[in-house]
Image (spheres, helix red, strand yellow):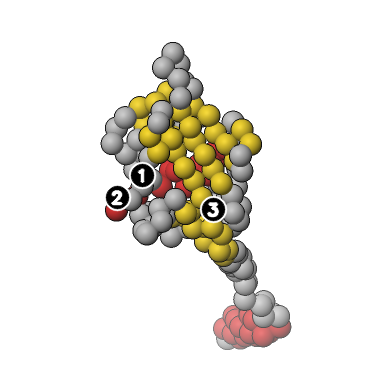
Amino acid sequence: MKTVFVIIAVFAVLVASIIYLNRSKIPQPATQISTPTPVLEEKVNIKATFTIITGNITRSFRAEKYHNQSPNVYIQNPDPSVVYVTKKGIRWSDFFNTLPMKLTKECLTTGDGETFCDGKDGSLKFYLNDIETPNLLEEQIKEVDKALIKFN
C-alpha cells in the first residue's frame, strides 16, 4: 500500500509542477512582421520635345504605333514631338526604349527598319537644348527640354 501511496504522491507532485510551470509562463507577444511602407512613386507632369533628323528628313512619329506606349513617358497625337513624362527620374533612353525603334549612342534603327550608324556614311549626334550632348540618352527628361538627334 505504501508503494501505491508513494506513486500517487509522486504523480501528484509532477502534475502540480506542470500546472504551476504552465501558469507561471509569461505570455510572449506575437511576433510582428514589419512590412515596409510602400514608397509612393513621385508623379510629375513634364513636357519636353524631341526631333530626329536623318540627312534632310525630319522623322515623323504620327503613326499610332509610337503613341501611348508607356504610362510613365509617351507621345500622342496631335503633336507627337511632345514627350509627356508622368514619373520622376525618366531618362531619354527610357523614352526611346518605349518606341518601336532602337537608338544607341552609335546607331539609330527607325521604326521602318532603316539604320543610321556612325561610320563612313555619317555620324549620329545628340543635342539637348541646342548644346551637343553625347550622353543625351542618360540625361533625365526635364521640363521644356528639347532633344535633337541628328544623322548627317
Q: Residue at x 62, y 72 (%)?
A: 32
Front residue of this view, candidates 48 and 102? 48
Mark 2, secondary structure of its residue = loop
Image marks 1 and 2: residues in contact by CB distance under 8 Å: yes
What amino acid is at disc 1?
Ser
> Mark 1 or 2, which is nearer the eye?
1
Q: Which residue is mark 2?
A: 63
The crowding category of the residue bearing disc 2, from other C-alpha atoms within 10 Å (few below 14, some 14 to 19, many at least 20), is few
**Image quarter of residue 47:** bottom right
Mark 2 is on which residue type? Ala
- Residue beneath disc 3: 48
Q: Earlier in the sequence, mark 3 or mark 1?
A: 3
* Picture coordinates of residue 38, whole percent (x, y): 58, 67
Label 1 residue SS: loop
Q: Real-space Cα distance between discs 1 and 2?
A: 8 Å
Q: Is residue 21 visible?
A: no
- Amino acid type, mark 3: Ala
Residue hosting label 1: 60
